[in-house]
Image (cartoon, coloured by chain):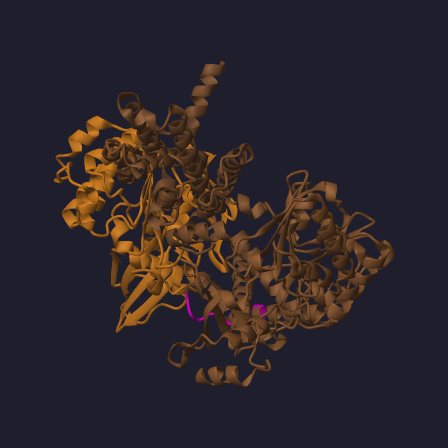
Chain colours: A brown, B orange
Amino acid sequence: MSWGEWVMTFKTSLFNKGLILSAIKRFWWVGALYTLLLFFILPLRHMMLKNNVTNEWSRNQISNSLNLNSHQNGFQFLLIIIVPVVLATLIFRYIQKSNTASMIHSLPYTRKTLYASHNAAGLLLFVLPIIFITIILMLLQITTNLSDYYSFSHIVAWGGHTLLFHLLFFSIAVFVGMFTGNSIAQMVFTYILHFLPAGLYVLTTHNLSQLLHGYNTSSFYNSLLDHLPIFTLLNARGGVDYSTTLNILGYIIASIIFFVTAYYVYKIRKIEVAGDVIAFRKIRPVFKYGVTICSMLLGGAYFTGIGGGSFSTIVFGYIFSSFLGYWIAEMLMEKSFKVWGAYKGYIAYTLIILMVLIGIRMDVTGYVGRVPESHEVESVYLGPLHEWEWVRRGEMPHEYNRMHRSGYFFETQENIENMIVLHKDLIQGSTPMDGIYRYQHIIYTLKNGKHLIRQYLINDEAYAASLTPIYESLEYKQERFPVIHQSNEDIKWIEINDYRSPKKSVVLSDSDELQEFITLLQEDIHNATFETLATDSSYMVTIMDAEEKRIDYGIRESYTSVFQWIRESDYYEEITLLPEDVGYVILDNMKGSHDYRTVEIRDKDVIKELMDLTKPSYHHSYQPDSISVRFHMKSNSRDSHHLGYLNSTSAVSGKLSYYLNQLQ
Amino acid sequence: MIEVTNLSKSFGKFKALDDLNIHVKKASVYGLLGPNGAGKTTLIKHLVGIYRQDGGVVTIGGEAVYENPSIKSTIVYIPDDLYFFSQYSINETAKFYASLYPTWNQERYETLKEVFPIDPQKRITKLSKGMQKQVAFWLGICIMPQVMILDEPVDGLDPVMRKKVWNLMLQDVAERETTILVSSHNLRELEDVCDHVGILHHGKVVVERELDNMKSDIHKLQIAFQDEVPEGFLDELEVLHRSESGSVLLLIAKGNKEELLSKVEKMNPVILDLLPLTLEEIFIYELGGMGYDIQNILI
């Protein structure tokens, strides 16, 4: 057989013109409708906007419309996720309806021909509209001034990307259709499949974090989930590039895999399953327990969300929602409400889940209590996960500004041990429910190359005892305050300002002055205690070094030498907020609408008292009945103000308490 | 022509066909009888290659049907539950079939417009159920099939049309040696057209018979003797059923007609009549002894 003949037989055995035409004849209207919609949102719109060239908005509209990244193309995004799925469902409707399935499968064609021909018809119904629109756009580009906004390559890129996503969504919908005997289920399952990996991931991590103290819920950067098509499209709308070679190649391969797998599934699929929710008996348990597990996780997340994270809430949430999920799945599959005969499966499931929960509770894997021995640890990190990842992947710029970082690496034996102590404290401690706390990751890099990652909510005040040796160590201070190993030759200038005040800042560039200031600052930092470092600052110092790198430092009240220097310098009044600068103060009880009251104060002494009372202090845990204090500045054309908070427990003078009483 | 050996099929836990065997000769009309739920449609869907069997062999013309386009293109299947593409007129459907079946006979299609008084421009799905059935026959006959498989075919056809359609098909059986397998739950309907009958019950073939043989093999006799029935008279005969009313004896007996008559005549009956038997009676009496309440199965 010659090559040509071979190709001919291949073509005729794979595709049948009659079948393709009949499918197109039945569903041409989908293609037509799609063409029309694309025509309205692209060429026609361009034609209407193009004469309005003076308007930047319309210019942007035109040039962004071919970019799936753009926010304004939400409608195109909708078409991409709807049109292929609807087409796949319609084209393969013939296997989901009993009499159609009988009629089509009694025709003298193999399943291969039926499958390939119907797919071909479906593909044509979206490929032709896209090509048609591409050609129209090209014609317009040649003949009109639209060439000012986009080039041929933009049009081709638009066509290519649109086709690619259609192909992928179509192939997934076809694939899903082979596993069900119901068209509605085919569409629903398709979309569920798109969201399932991410949904499961989120639900699983959320539930584990409720069950496992210290479980890391932050996701890793650039994870596989971001490459799922629907998230790629959604992320692209946030500006992430969707058209990387890896994505494109991956999607093409994925489409092929879906088409080929779907064919083999179709081949073994029985025709009599038309109408069933699940087409293969063997995957019915997968569906049933899949629904049960998903609803269990969803219920767990819901009940811990509304009822707090206690173990009994979780167990109740799990049992209640898995019960619902199990029976709903069973009813769907049996198409009947009388499914109580399946109770054995549910009892088995519940027993297994209870055992797993108890196992987790008893920490049989030792996850919660696992703390490495200090001699196993090479380094340990405290801070947010993403920063650690950047550093590990070498993506953190070397000169990355310290002030934008909050994570610390410790390598000294002493600090590794300090961290282990902190970690053990955190394991013992419970999740704080009041005060100021934040998520911190503890990440050990072990000598065997592995990492141990844990995440805790840390309230600095509550863990002061174990944080103190870390904060007061030189290693920590060197990383947090690069200035302590800089000499004044490394520094170009220093800018000081009081961030409360709208006054101008002062820049020190005189070498002697610099020298003096730096030495004092270094001294203060060396002496700084944990309490100092955990307190907010009053002044802000920006240091510009010789490499044009700026770092901001907060100057705390307890930096006595530096404070002293500023107070004695000529700059003090120039930069500092003084009671005279304040025009008036508004107190505000921060209550809901009907109890809301404010008081205005113009009394100088009281203003001074309030300034002292609202100074940053170490004990800044949030009080529910705090009072907000708004300092409105004098002699300023803009209404500039500084906001402070007054704790209800503070000792106040008689005058101030008179004002405070008015707030009650 | 059609050979089904040890065919089994289950739907979930329900066993629809159980080790079933049928044989249909070429150029014959085979009636598949059975009550609702006996497995007739399931068997038929195996014959036309829609279902894949769990076990056993289904061949037509010596070849397996499933996934075999060359065999399937010689078969026409007219289901009980018809389906036509909703946008298609009769002419368009004919064109579609012409592109699918190499044996399509356009000339015949045109000729048969005389027989089927329906506007060929009309959308099929807009026609009445009976007319849709006519269209199915019209198009099916034009495919010039080797085998026609008809599931409850005459439902919805008026008696005149029923006759016309059967005449057309039987003509093909005679001239082109077409084989027809037709299912029904009504025996009387098949009596005039079938030469073979198979009875299906609970997924099994209970009986498979050639009708001519059956009719010549079982007889209804009305006998009256002068006095009492002679001693030992019935022992000589294979009696399926007897009833007496007064001195008249009604016998359903099996055996060669001539032999039977000569045996009875030896006893010198006063009256000896050979009465006609309906197919229904034949089945009832023949199968009565097999433990099946055939009266409940059929009709």
Point out residue A418 in the picture as x, y percentages from the top left corner: 81, 62
Q: Is residue A469 visible?
A: yes
Residue drawn at (41%, 79%) of the image: A597
Q: Is residue A255 above or below residue B182?
A: above
Residue drawn at (38%, 65%) of the image: B293
Is-magenta flag for residue A341?
yes
Left or right relative to A372: residue A639: left
Start-end of magenta stretch: A336-345
Number of marks in picture? 0
Residue drawn at (29%, 37%) of the image: A58
Q: Quadrant of residue B66?
A: top left
Point out residue A115 in the picture as x, y percentages from the top left corner: 42, 37
Q: Is residue A19 visible?
A: no
Q: Is residue A364 above or below residue B5?
A: below
Q: Is residue A297 above or below residue A57?
A: below
Q: Is residue A344 above or below residue A156?
A: below
The answer to which of A584 and A204 lies nearer the viewer is: A584
Residue drawn at (30%, 59%) of the image: B281
The C terminus of chain A: image quadrant: bottom left
The answer to which of B76 and B97 lies nearer the viewer is: B97
Is-magenta flag for residue A546?
no
| Residue at the limit of the structure toward the right, as seen here | A375
Left or right relative to B7: residue A88: left
Point out residue B46 in the picture as x, y percentages from the top left corner: 43, 45
Left or right relative to B100: residue B18: right
Point out residue B2 in the picture as x, y percentages from the top left corner: 41, 40
Q: Quadrant of residue A556?
A: bottom right
